[in-house]
Image (spheres, grey):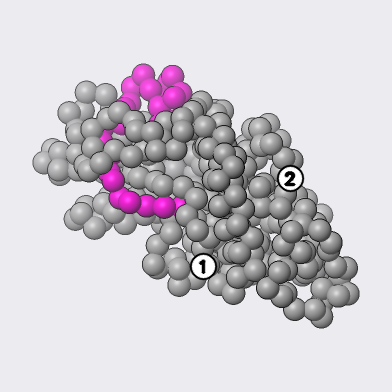
Amino acid sequence: MAPWSTYRQAAGIGAAALATVLLVTACGGESGGSDSAATAPAGPNTVALINGGKITTCTNIPYEPFQFNQGDKVVGFDVDIVDLVAKKLGVTQDIVDIDFAAIKSGAALNSRKCDVAAAGMTITDERKQNLLFSEPYFDATQALMAKKGSGVTSLDDVKAKNLKLGAQASTTGLDYVKGKGFEPIEFADSPKELLGLQTGQADVIVQDLPVVLTWLKKPEIGAKFEQVASLDTGEQYGIGMKKDNTALKKVIDEVLAAAKSDGTYNAIYKKWFGTEPGAATGGASDGATTGESPATTGTESPAAGS
């Protein structure tokens, strides 16, 4: 479980409460009341939050091991990282489950559904047009997954064998294989993508390597399927914010830098991936293999995307 409490958004929050802005000092000390929040602008050392006493995170559940349900809580690597920010601000984290397309487009942030977006989201030039990103907090890569004994070791094999390739919609994995000349079958989310592989709708799928490795930790999946290639795409994840929210970006970047300096980041990383950052995994590679090996973390299949 996450080291600090994480709460789901309460169903009874009214529209007026959603519109209230709380000014919180970046050091997590004092907070202003609703009257002052309505008139006082956010200065360089303050952070404007849409809900009093909370930092609200938009994500797309499940995307194990980054965020997924464990009992009545949402847990995962991204959850623990944002909890560090919440602790710095002296607030708690509230999580909103929302479509990934609305996250990467900036629509969820612009409509004030959340303060930050943490959903295993790759930083891209296109997304930078709609979002303000934190400094990168995770180095990612893609992987190919297929039935054991498929003989596939690369995208070239997929093409040569005329196999059906599947990818999750709205993700960088989809963009990557399209850039290589493929027209993959698109699945709305990663559980549907995995099901598509299991039912033969696709012969091979492309997905973030940590997600693939988490799937393969499950005995019923690992017995029949395997990672057949790692695609070194040079991706990095970032936490998204509204374009003008430089005060929050400053706090998040400071928190990330401190966590990497004092060992907190490595501890959270090892908790969810079972190894230190930068450890390599096995499997064939279309380029350098730079993935991470997740620890077994529950029973749900991932849904969000990179």
Q: Residue at x 64, y 64 (%)?
A: 248
Quarter of the image where one finds residue 217: top left
Quarter of the image where one finds residue 264: top right
User: Split into 4 quadrants, where in the image is the N terminus?
Assistant: top right
Earlier residue among tags 1 and 2: 2
Element at label 1: loop
Q: Is residue 98 left or right of residue 306?
A: right
Q: Position of residue 110 (x, y in %)?
A: 60, 70
Q: Residue at x 62, y 70 (%)?
A: 245
Do callouts 1 and 2 mark residues in contact (Cβ within 8 Å)?
no
Q: Position of residue 184 (x, y in %)?
A: 27, 50
Q: Which residue is mark 2?
A: 7
Q: Which residues are magenta?
A: 212-237
Element at label 2: strand
Quarter of the image where one finds residue 2: top right
Res. 202 in view: no
Q: How many marks overall?
A: 2
Q: Nearer the viewer, residue 253 or 283?
A: 253
For the residue carrying disc 2, how many other residues have a C-alpha within 10 Å: few (<14), some (14-19), or many (20+)?
some
Q: Residue at x 33, y 22 (%)?
A: 224
Q: Hey, what amino acid is under mark 1?
A: Leu
Residue lying farthest to the left in this orientation: 160
Q: Which residue is mark 1?
A: 131
In this picture, is 282 found above or below 84?
above
Q: Hey, what amino acid is under mark 2?
A: Tyr
In this picture, is 121 found above or below 293?
below
Q: Nearer the viewer, residue 201 or 213?
A: 213
- Tell whether position 277 is magenta: no
Residue lying farthest to the front in this orientation: 261
The Cα atoms of the two marked residues, 1 and 2, are separated by 25 Å
In this picture, is 174 found above or below 130?
above
- Tell whether position 223 is magenta: yes
